[in-house]
Image (tube, helix red, strand yellow):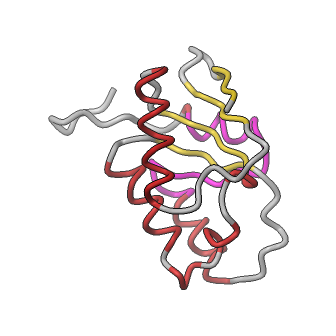
Amino acid sequence: MKYTFVGVHDSIAYIEDDDVMITDGQSALDLMMTMKYETNCNKMILEKESMSEDFFVLRNGIAGEILQKFINYQIKLAVVGDFSGYESKALKDFMYECNNGNSIFFAADFEEGIKMLEGACIQTIEGGTL
């Protein structure tokens, strides 16, 4: 796994790997904890290809399980890539709702992913924002 820091203050980890890195909740948690330990970074960009194709089939619950881990551990995530090949209305609605939130984003390209993450607020335990 290779990562580089991007964004205005190099506060976003762009994680590159040719293999599928996230297949379930445990692999997502492993990636998050590795990145948190190695970099103390709480914002990440992953290529769409880093996610198992099962992630994009909502009825199996994998996307919900994985994204809940990111939300629970307060890690912001942007998944970047070409999503036009997915026909599911439910998936398109899901991505739209995520993009209107503050934690998980689906972006067409790397630059858009950076902008989305830079606009996301980080919550503290007290409920304030940084």
Q: Residue at x 66, y 31 (%)?
A: 14
Q: Residue at x 46, y 58 (%)?
A: 67
Residue at the farthest top position: 9
Camera-side residue of 115 and 79:
79
- Residue 113 position by quadrant: top right
Camera-side residue of 66 and 18:
18
Task: State left or right for residue 59 relative to residue 71.
Answer: right
- Residue 15 position by quadrant: top right
How far from the left and from the top, in percent, is residue 33? 41, 36
How far from the left and from the top, in percent, is residue 77? 54, 45
Does 74 appear in magenta? no
Q: Residue at x 66, y 43 (%)?
A: 46
Task: State left or right for residue 9 relative to residue 82.
Answer: left
Quadrant for the N terminus in the image: top right
- Residue 22 position by quadrant: bottom right
How far from the left and from the top, in percent, is residue 55? 61, 68
Q: Which residues fall within the magenta stretch?
A: 99-117
